[in-house]
Amino acid sequence: MASFLQIENLSKSYGDRILFNSITFGVNEGDKIGIIAKNGTGKSTLLKIISGKETADEGKITFRNNLRVAILDQIPEFPADATVLGSCMFDNSETAKVIEEYEYAISKGDANEINQAITLMDSANAWDYEDKLKQLLSQLKINDITAKICTLSGGQRKRVAIARLILEKPDLIILDEPTNHLDIEIIEWLENYLTRSRITLLMVTHDRYFLDRICNKIIEIDNKLIYTYEGNYDYYLRRRKERIEAMSAELAKVKNTLRREQEWMSRQPQARAGKAKYRIDSFYELKKRSQVDLTERNVNLEVKSSYIGSKIFEAEGISKQFGDKIILNDFTYTFARYEKLGIIGNNGAGKSTFIKMLQGLIPADSGEWNVGETVRFGYYSQDGIKFDENKKVVDAITEIAEDVIINENVHYSPMQFLNHFLFSPTDQQKYIHTLSGGERCRLHLATVLMRSPNFLILDEPTNDLDIVTLGILEEYLCNFKGCLIVISHDRYFLDNIVDHIFVFEGNGVIKDFPGNYSDFREWQDEFSKTNKTIEKPKEKTIEKPKTERQQKMTFKERKEFEQLSTEIERLTAEKAALDTLFNSGQEIPDIFEKSARYNKLKEELDEKELRWLELSEKD
């Protein structure tokens, strides 16, 4: 495999805090690499150094000549007043530059410049770039290409950035937390695309299903060093456990040997004056090796919930809408003691509004919430808690409570409590504006749990938390003696915690599904199959084995590509018409046939859009 990127002896530190030291690894063509590490150990910093946004203290980064690299930042940046289409068409990409040069040549009317520009347009396959962009944005649920970027949500901006990145057809993609702010439907679309694509990939993500299904290599940053595992996330977990066990056994041997050598070194100097110098040097080397710290410093969530009675909350005929957008429509539900509920749905379906209404933060248009007297809410908001940025961490916690009461027998001072959330005495003196995203999440989580709530409401708690902390949070929630509502796009997280799921389908429709997220997806797939209309079986075709990477479409494939564009446009229009009908509120006599047709349309669109993407890569 051709080498795309080589990292040699790279080191980075901030003051006396070393992130990584003399790390070396390579990225070869076809690699799909996930980088794993705890918060604050240098994952995002490493990506920023590779992409040229930060500099290393030492080391060398070498890209292959003429390698096309595309980067998806955690928070993509766009020109302030750009539209969706404009931000993709006229950024700093090579294709956009070619289009811009062609239009400039046309405006000048110079025949030589026009001919040169046409040649460049041909080589860049830029003639139908705009059509491809519109088609791709449609697949990513961005339908208004004239909308200003500044009016879009964080998730919508992320989708625009993904479309821009895919159409650049880079050799290497660098992704920094690509699933943050995306709903599950788009995450699965991106997962499917990256799995089927031949692209080379280097990414940081906490989404464990995403890592498991896409990556063929995992790189772990641990104790300032890196460890490489040739396999997916599940393989990494097994091999990492073996590595830690082997290192622990080796460390025990080193310490035993060191004790014997310590006795020898402790004798009178004249007793060992004639001994070999190599043995003295070996002692100091053993001493250095024995000082390796293999202990796992993790968040401690041993926080008890307060007593909760049998009455939790009842919702009676709750309705809510903003203008023409319906969030809830005559919603009625009785929440049970110790219930653990997951909420999923597309961005904008009303998930966050629902939990804010439950807590009385947003009023209902009609209906009534009846909350039990013993219920004590603990709310983790995806917007984060509003701290005074100029305060120190310990001062912010002390303002909330000078004595953190865990139960009748256990009280913590603010400094002791923060230590359970990995804030060392030094970290507690940091100003809040200097904290990383992961540190802010841990501080937010600390403020929620320090009040000993018995009803936790978590809105996207997995953003910015590292995988180790997520695992600890999952274990805590599974054993939590209270009630839980969690909104999350992290499928692994939902699978491990919830008993049932509310599916927000939009237009005020909420379906209650008994089971976790994977159970729901399995049911959804089965439902789609059973509602298929009987079709004439397609003739099987034997695909010719691929002996080399195809760069251009064949004549037959180009015809198929053109036909797909037409079919996708027709199917999208039919689906949009059914959406309008379903959202109209009018009575639909043949609702079951139309529902079956709607599910069939979605399946056909998925298949054709993925095939369209495969062919577009060859153009």
Image: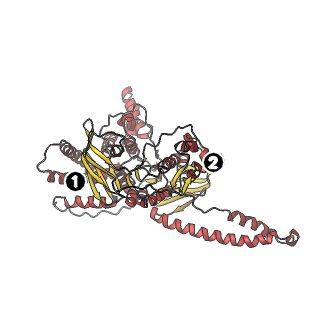
Label 1 or label 2, whichever comes before in sequence order:
2
Horizontal relation, residue 537 to residue 69: left or right: left
The local secondary structure at tag 1 comes to: helix
Q: Is residue 228 above or below residue 569?
A: below
Dot 2, how many residues are within 10 Å of its Cα: few (below 14), some (14-19), or many (20+)?
A: few
Q: Position of residue 276 (x, y in %)?
A: 82, 71
Q: Nearer the viewer, residue 294 or 322?
A: 322
Question: Outermost residue, right direction?
Answer: 270
* Residue matched to label 1: 599
Query: Could one spot residue 556 in this view of the protein?
Result: no
Q: Position of residue 16 (x, y in %)?
A: 66, 48
| Residue at 25% across, 61% down | 526
Q: Nearer the viewer, residue 125 or 568?
A: 568
* Residue matched to label 2: 426
Q: Amino acid at mark 1?
A: Asn
| Residue at 57% across, 66% down | 244
Q: Is residue 162 above or below residue 218?
A: above
| Residue at 54% across, 38% down | 389
Q: Amino acid at mark 2?
A: Thr
